[in-house]
Amino acid sequence: MPMFVRTLAAKAVLILIAFLSTFAAVPALAQQVATTQDQINQQLLERIQELEKEVQQLKGQSSVPAVAPAPAPAPAPVADTPEVNEVAPRLHLDVFGDVGVQGYNHVPSTFEFGSLDLFMNARLSDKFSALGEVLFIAQSDNTVGLDIERLWLQYRPSNYFIASIGRYHTWVGYYNSHYNKAEYLETTTDRPFVYAFDDQGGVLPMQEIGVSITGRIPSGRLGLNYVLELGNGRAWGGTAEPVQNYQDANNSKSINGGLFMRPDQLRGLQMGFSLRYDNLTVPGPPVAETIATSHVVFDNGKYEILNEGVLVRHVEPTGPVFTTSAFYTQWSRAFGRYRPYFRYEYFNAPSDDPVYMYASANEYAPLAVTGFIGRLNGASLGIRYDATENVALKFQYDRFSMRDLATENGLTAQVAFTF
């Protein structure tokens, strides 16, 4: 056999042996791979079972303890709020006061105590309420007098009928029915000359003992209201008390009626009039008194425009007719806490009027400011500053001309407050 044939046969034998060896090893390798895969699958199955057990344990727990929340921050300190001015479950009390300094041409400048006003009101039931106002006021002889300013019981079954009995402020004009004794409630340092209180030298009946009935009139958007008053009237002469608190000097009673409207179209506007009749007891013959007033005012909190006119007629049984006329106009506008204001007023009464010539001589301003009954006219210019919700500072300059007397100039600084 040739040499290359033997070589080729030997190589074929070697290839066959290698092939057979490889073929024989495949089952063993496959078996090894299968064994390894089975182990991996078993491990994965065991891990899945462990995870399922953990999930079941978590689901089986009734509650999961929560992390305690962080403590809430301490509240910021709050200023003490004023307590409600309630001295009894149904009684409320407001206190007003004013002090100041004043100087006029004809009198020494002086610090002055104005008044201390205790204002009480109570709701007794759904239909009944009560009001009381006690006033401590400085007198011209430097004493402090006590005055029961108002005291009445009110019955209010509806807004169309409101009846009050006792001592009340008369509905003679807008100013007297809108502003009580407290200076804090007024823009200016004082009342218009014609509306000064009659127990302090004023010329109109500002207070009364009797019955007052008021209420709405069905009128749609016109906002009509009526007022009816029946009282003792007043007395004049010497040191007589104008308000007849206990005993009427005569059988005649004062009668006062009025109408006013507050239209819905213009909030803050009020227009109205009043007419009062009374027979006065004075030294000498009795005097029939008729007082007519009218007003147009606008007050919406920012703007204040007050306009009023007054006509007083005194008639003796056999004597002449005495007529007194007066008016005032007052304008102001708020600029934040500041409210500048201007007022012009006019008053003209006959010097020989049988009623005014007997004005009480032991009381003070406003008649004591002029020292006479006659013509007075002039202007007041001032500013009010509300330092807080309960404290007001006022500065006012007055300049008045009077019949046959020198012109008066005066300055007033006032602190009015409530608590």
Image (tube, rainbow, N blue to C red):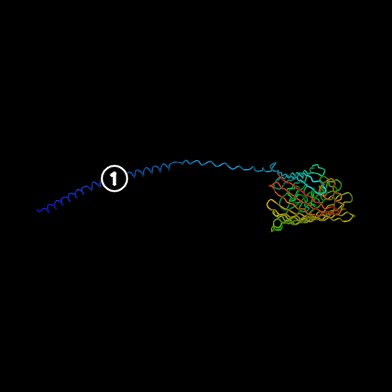
Residue 132 picture quarter? top right
Residue situated in front as seen by the camera: 112 or 41: 112
Q: Residue at x 22, y 47 (%)?
A: 25
Task: Estimate the x, y position of residue 341 in percent, counting from the top left.
Answer: 73, 53
Tally of numbered discs: 1
Residue at image point 29% right, 45% down: 36
Which residue is at the far left? 1
Q: In this picture, is 262 found above or below 199? A: below
Residue type at mark 1? Thr
**Secondary structure at numbered mark 1:** helix
Asked if residue 342 is positioned above or below residue 240 in the image, the reply reads below
- Where residue 348 sits: x, y (%)? 83, 55
Q: Residues within 10 Å of mark 1 (few under 14, many from 20)?
A: few
Image point 40% across, 42% down: which residue? 54
Depth check: give the residue in front, 50 or 407.
407
The answer to whether 31 appears left or right of 347 in the picture is left
Q: In this rendering, would 32 be left or right of 205?
A: left
The residue singled out by tag 1 in the image is: 36
Assign the C terminus to one quadrant of the image: top right
Q: Position of residue 42 (x, y in %)?
A: 32, 44
Closest to the observer, 410 or 95? 410
> What residue sits 89% from the left and 56% below the top?
320
> Residue 375: percent from the left, percent from the top?
84, 54
